[in-house]
Image (cartoon, rainbow, N blue to C red):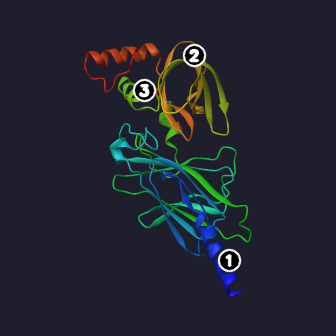
Amino acid sequence: MLGIVALLVSFLSGLHASTASYSEDQCSWKGSGLSQQQGSVEQIWLRCAEGSVEWLYPLGALRLTLSPRLPWGLVGSGGGGGGGGGGAGGVLSVCVKPSEQFGGAQLYLERGGVLELLLGEETEVNASPKVHCFTATPGERPALFLQATPHQDISRRVAAFRYELRGDWPPRVSVNSDPISSEDACRPCNSTEILMAVCTSDFVVRGNIRAVEPDASLGAAVIKVAATRVFRQKSALFTGGRLTRSGEFRTPLQCGVRPGAGSFLFTGHSHFGQAWLGCAPRYKDFQRAYNQARLAQEMPCELDAV
């Protein structure tokens, strides 16, 4: 009988241990509170600029240290394995996006030994959960603290979210501001900003606006575009034939974008799998700025066949 009990305990221990694992690249982690002792804190290190966390049956707590392998200034436009432009003064933007059914835990930012609430339990049950962001400075390792909340039934509770670290967004002081949807997004770019956007954006596309549709859940306008030239794209944002591809961007509703004739150069960033618009000058204005910078030998990068 004792042998059977010992065998059962060994089996259960092995089962619990197998419920927690990193992805092969250590960008993501998935685990279960059933493998933790009551009141314990499990230490987790995530080594990429983007990834995900999924905590089933939350019990105890998780401390998640975001420590990408890349040098600080290169975190951002290359995502989990790329480089790109450095941030504003080396400041890093960190964003988390909860799953639609986030529950069973609360998520905190840990800074200087103080916990600041980022996400309360089940406050984000929404088809389009809100993105929460904060900034970190060079030398600071951002840490998140995921604390389980007590429940009699934990069987249906999952605390899951995605995270992104970016070194190429302007710094934001408040914890819950999203750099993508800031007021600065509506300000027209000057020539210097346009040329820098061409060199550091996740996508650089020439095209025409086909339609603009509101997305009230995101507080954004969805801009549907026919692309005549894709200079660069981080992921398959634009798909289609050899001559014309289609895709869409998002930009804050308050920017008041409307459909219009003419060719534009669209630049911007991929944010949790969606393309968000940055600088978008008319193509002739971009060409003028680009040619002037090349003549003055001040162009920070080259684009083929502009």
Name the residue: 56% across, 68% down.
61
What residue does disc 1 label?
Answer: 8
Tag 1's secondary structure? helix
Q: Is residue 57 above or below residue 181?
A: below
In screen coordinates, is 78 left or right of 120?
left
Tags 2 and 1 touching, CB below 8 Å: no
Q: Label 2 belongs to which residue?
A: 244
Where residue 253 sits in the image (x, y, percent)? 60, 32
Q: Earlier in the sequence, mark 2 or mark 1?
A: 1
Secondary-structure class at tag 2: loop
Q: Of all residues shown, which one is farthest toward the bottom?
A: 2
The three-letter amino acid code for the residue at tag 2 is Thr
Residue 260 x, y percent position in the rendering: 58, 15
- The Cα atoms of the two marked residues, 2 and 1, are separated by 61 Å
Q: Position of residue 251 (x, y in %)?
A: 56, 32
Between disc 2 and disc 1, the foreground one is: 1
Q: Residue 147 falls in which quadrant of the image? A: bottom right
Q: Residue at x 66, y 30 (%)?
A: 214
Q: Whole-Å distance between the Cαs marked 3 and 1?
A: 65 Å
Residue named by callout 3: 189
